[in-house]
Amino acid sequence: MVAVVREVPVSSYALEVDGQLRAEFATKDGATAGGAELKRRFPMLKIRVYDVQTNECEEIYG
């Protein structure tokens, strides 16, 4: 099995799903909305918004 390696974005927000970066967003609001929609559809996933500039993560709760 081969894993896909994704690079960390340089100046934006990323959506982390179960410890893997899955999507990149230009704004925090966009990343939070996308994460909330995923969490609503799949409540068992661990979804976090990763802020590249501050190097911090914020978990999305359903």
Image (tube, rainbow, N blue to C red):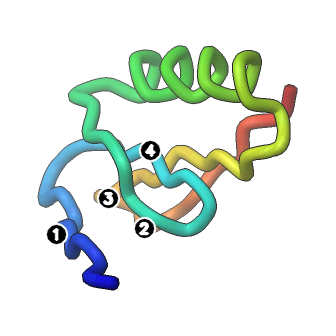
Are circles 4 and 1 on residues that touch, CB within 8 Å?
Answer: no
CA distance for labels 4 and 1: 13 Å
Q: Residues within 10 Å of mark 2 (few under 14, many from 20)?
A: few
The amino acid pointed to by label 2 is: Asn
Camera-nearest residue between 56 and 24: 24
Q: Nearer the viewer, mark 2 or mark 4?
A: 4
Q: Earlier in the sequence, mark 2 or mark 4?
A: 4
Q: Nearer the viewer, residue 30 or 16?
A: 16
Indicate which disc, 3 or 1, sits on the residue closer to the N terminus.
1
N-term mark: 1 or 2: 1
Q: Which residue is mark 3?
A: 52
Numbered label attached to residue 55: 2
Q: Nearer the viewer, residue 42 or 54?
A: 42
Amino acid type of the residue that numbered disc 3 sits on in the rendered structure: Val
Question: Which residue type carries mark 1?
Answer: Glu
Residue 18's place in the image compared with 35, above or below, is below
Look at label 4 and name its amino acid.
Answer: Leu
